[in-house]
Image: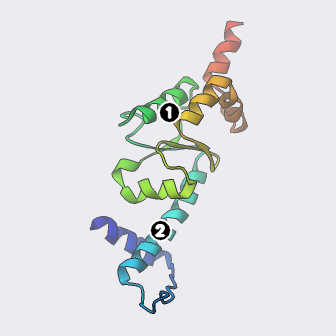
Amino acid sequence: MNNLIRATARCLRSGAAVYLPRQTDGRVWSAASARFLCSAVDIQKDLGEMVKKDKVVVFMKGTPAQPMCGFSNAVVQILRMHGVDEYAAYNVLEDQDLRQGVKDFSNWPTIPQVYFNGEFVGGCDILLQMHQNGDLVEELQKLGISSALQNAEKESK
């Protein structure tokens, strides 16, 4: 119930207006439908801002200090190996609207989800593949982040 109240208040504060035409059978949409649509529009706007706020953004189960699933843990470990310690991490287990919203936003059905400079990269499998084939080092360079693995390789030569 608190999530519904918060979402409705957020929607009203943002000044969002939702036009709800009559349904095809002539019925009018309910107030609950209006709140849901307003909340969905609001969360998509919020997500658009969240993924652009930091160079690296991760939506995960748990936190970097305490991942709550193996895939989220793998993403944290891959980033850690590359020396990426400063990134925004959002725990989707704390907010079901965020959990579903990020899946809708990216059109990707699973968590974790990784974004670089506001662009969706993928989940654990994609990040692991990028790590294994060296693409992650290149992508981090584009962000102005020097990979610790690349630095270690240079030092060993």
User: Quick check: marks 2 and 1 in contact, CB under 8 Å?
Assistant: no
Instruction: Please provide percent x and percent y for residue 47.
Output: 53, 58
**In the image, 150: left or right of 97?**
right
Q: Is residue 39 above or below residue 132?
A: below
122 is higher (above) or lower (below) than 42: above
Residue 41 vertical placement versus 151 (above, below): below
Q: Residue at x 54, y 55 (%)?
A: 50
Q: Give 46 or 72, whichever is nearer the viewer.
A: 72
Q: Which of the image's four quarters has the C terminus?
A: top right
Front one among 75 and 89: 75
In the visual, does 126 lie left or right of 157?
left
Numbered disc 2: secondary structure: helix
State how far apart marks 2 and 1 are (Cα). Answer: 27 Å
Badge 2: how crowded within 10 Å, few (<14), some, or many (20+)? many
Q: Residue furthest toward the front? A: 25
The quarter of the picture where the N terminus appears is: bottom left
Image coordinates of residue 76 in percent, x first then y, are 48, 32
Residue 75 is marked as 1
Residue that protrudes farthest toward the bottom in the picture: 26
Q: Which residue is mark 2?
A: 40
Closer to us: 26 or 90: 26
Which quadrant would residue 48 be assigned to in this image?
bottom right
Residue extending furthest top?
157
Q: How many marks?
A: 2
Inspect the image, locate mark 1, and give the three-letter code of the amino acid beneath it.
Val
The earlier-in-sequence mark between 2 and 1 is 2
Find residue 29 and report its horizontal and vertical position in percent: 42, 85
Q: Secondary structure at mark 1?
A: helix
Circle on res. 67: none
Residue type for callout 2: Ala
Quarter of the image where one finds residue 125: top right
